[in-house]
Amino acid sequence: GVDIEIHHTGAAHTPGDSFIWLPSKQTVFTGDIVYVERILGLGSQSSISEWPSSFQAFAKLNPVHIVPGHGGVTSLEQATAQTYDYLMNLRVQIGALLDADGTIIDAPKIDQSAFADLEQFQSLAGRNAQQAFEQMEWE
């Protein structure tokens, strides 16, 4: 008896990311579009260019409850701070590196310190920066 809406947003963590919206519960199940409590993983299957718009697609619904792909049930505020803001930081920092004719070897040195408290930061931040560089150099 609960209406659900399935929204295919396009690429984010994977090429076929979708989210499920329960309007009567103001709840969204985002899968890997949202990571909280730990840093997201940007892989070769991910899209640094489309992930932010996939995030915005569900955020415009102003959900009260978000069930992320990683981490506990959360708010839009925390999801934005730990996923969207991280993605945008990568885009800004790597964009500046590309504009300065930096190389993929320089990518792990960008400033991601605002997200250092997230689990797996030490393991994934450098790799995420290099993956973002690799994708963004062809935008």
Image (cartoon, rainbow, N blue to C red):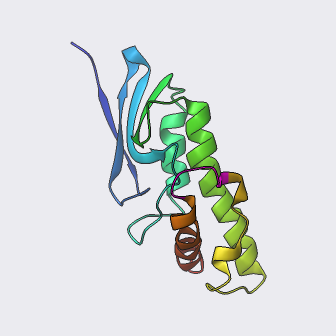
Q: Residue placed at 43% from the left, 64% from the top?
A: 46
Q: Residue placed at 59% from the left, 76% from the top?
A: 133
Q: Quadrant of residue 10?
A: bottom left
Q: Would you say the magenta stretch is mainly helix, strand or loop?
A: loop
Q: Quadrant of residue 22?
A: top left
Q: Residue furthest left?
A: 1
Range shown magenta: 115-120
Q: Nearer the viewer, residue 60 or 120?
A: 120
Q: Quadrant of residue 109?
A: bottom right
Question: Is 115 positioned to the left or the right of 25 in the image?
Answer: right
Q: Residue furthest right?
A: 100
**Is residue 5 a member of the stretch shown in magenta?**
no
Note whether 68 is above or below 115 in the view shown: above
Q: Quadrant of the N terminus?
A: top left
Question: Is 31 positioned to the left or the right of 125 in the image?
Answer: left
Question: Is 56 positioned to the left or the right of 30 in the image?
Answer: right
Question: Is 115 positioned to the left or the right of 56 in the image?
Answer: right
Q: How many marks?
A: 0
Q: Position of residue 20 (x, y in %)?
A: 34, 34
Q: Quadrant of the C terminus?
A: bottom right
Q: Nearer the viewer, residue 137 or 127?
A: 127
Q: Nearer the viewer, residue 131 or 2?
A: 131
Q: Residue placed at 54% from the left, 68% from the top?
A: 128
Q: Position of residue 15 (x, y in %)?
A: 35, 60
Note whether 53 is above or below 63 in the view shown: below
Q: Residue placed at 60% from the left, 56% from the top?
A: 87
Q: Position of residue 52 (x, y in %)?
A: 55, 52
